[in-house]
Image: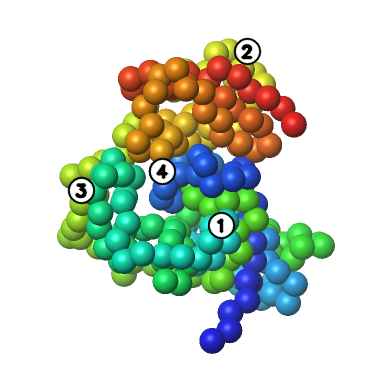
C-alpha cells in the first residue's frame, strides 16, 4: 500500500497544544489547503465550489511516536476513564489517519500554486499533509444518529477575557478565532491549577493565559 500527500494545510496552530479536539468547534479558525506538485491541475477541483463543506482525510504527522494501545483515555471523560481506541477520535491509532469536516469558503486558482482552498473550522496543525479531499454530501447527514459517550459529556466551555490592549495585539481578524480556541479549554484534562500559566502558539503569537474556575484570562501576547 502506498499513499502520498495530495496537499498540505496552513493553519494558525504551530503545535498540537491548543488545537481544537474536533473540527468545527472553533468555526472562525482559518485554514488554507495548498495542493502538492503533481496535483495542481485546476481540473482537479472542478465543481468543488458548489459544496459548502468538505472532508479532509489527513495524516497525524505531528505525533512524536507511532505507538498505540487498544484503550485510550478521552479528554471528554476527564482523562480518567478508558475506552477502546476505535470508540474514540484519539490520534494514536493503528493507522494514524485523521478525518475532519470543514467549511469551504472559496476555491481559488493561484498563478503559482494552482488550486487553493480557503476553509474554516479546521483542527489540524500547520503543515499537516492531506491525503484526500471529498465533498460533504447529503447522505453524510444522519439526524437520527447516537453519539455514544459524547452525548452525555459535552466539551467544557470557558468564558474568555482578553484585555483590550492584548486584543489590539492579536488584531480584529484573528481575535474571534483565538477566543473560540481558548474557550474550548486547551489544558490537559487533569490540570486545574489556577496559578499555573499556560501558552498557546497561535498564528505565530505566544498567547499566555491562566484559568480560574470557568474563566480563562489572557495575560500576555508575545509576538515573534
Please tell me which residue is depicted at 23% across the width and 43% down the height of the picture. 153
- In space, the residues marked 2 and 3 are separated at their CA atoms by 39 Å
| Residue at disc 2, secondary structure | helix
- In space, the residues marked 1 and 4 are separated at their CA atoms by 24 Å
Please tell me which residue is depicted at 81% across the width and 62% down the height of the picture. 111
Residue situated furthest right in the rendering: 112
Camera-nearest residue between 137 and 216: 216
- The answer to which of marks 1 and 3 sits earlier in the sequence is 1
> Which mark, residue 187?
none
- In space, the residues marked 4 and 2 are separated at their CA atoms by 26 Å
- The answer to which of marks 2 and 1 sits earlier in the sequence is 1
Name the residue beneath numbered marker 2.
165
| Residue at disc 1, secondary structure | loop
Say whether marks 2 and 1 touch (CB < 8 Å): no
Residue 97: x and y in percent read 47, 67
| Residue at disc 4, secondary structure | loop
- In space, the residues marked 2 and 1 are separated at their CA atoms by 36 Å
Please tell me which residue is depicted at 61% across the width and 36% down the height of the picture. 201
> Which mark, residue 64?
1
Amino acid at each position: 500500500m502506498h499513499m502520498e500527500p495530495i496537499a498540505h494545510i496552513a493553519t494558525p496552530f504551530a503545535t498540537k497544544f491548543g488545537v481544537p479536539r474536533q473540527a468545527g468547534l472553533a468555526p472562525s479558525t482559518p485554514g488554507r489547503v495548498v495542493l502538492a506538485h503533481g496535483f495542481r491541475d485546476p481540473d482537479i477541483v472542478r465543481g468543488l465550489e458548489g459544496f459548502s463543506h468538505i472532508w479532509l482525510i489527513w495524516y497525524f504527522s505531528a505525533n512524536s511516536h507511532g505507538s498505540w494501545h487498544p484503550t485510550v483515555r478521552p479528554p471528554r471523560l476527564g482523562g480518567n476513564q478508558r475506552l477502546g481506541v476505535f470508540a474514540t477520535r484519539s490520534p494514536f491509532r493503528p493507522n494514524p489517519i485523521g478525518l475532519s469536516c470543514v467549511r469551504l469558503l472559496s476555491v481559488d486558482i493561484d498563478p503559482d500554486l494552482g488550486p487553493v482552498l480557503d476553509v474554516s473550522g479546521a483542527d489540524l496543525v500547520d503543515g499537516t499533509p492531506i491525503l484526500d479531499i471529498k465533498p460533504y454530501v447529503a447522505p453524510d447527514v444522519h439526524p437520527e444518529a447516537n453519539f455514544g459517550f459524547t452525548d452525555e459529556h459535552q466539551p467544557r466551555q470557558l468564558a474568555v477575557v482578553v484585555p483590550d490592549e492584548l486584543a489590539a495585539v492579536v488584531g480584529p481578524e484573528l481575535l474571534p478565532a483565538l477566543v473560540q480556541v481558548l474557550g474550548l479549554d486547551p489544558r490537559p484534562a487533569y490540570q486545574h491549577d489556577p496559578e499555573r500559566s499556560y501558552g498557546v502558539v497561535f498564528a505565530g503569537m505566544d498567547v499566555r493565559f491562566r484559568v480560574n474556575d470557568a474563566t480563562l484570562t489572557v495575560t500576555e501576547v508575545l509576538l515573534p
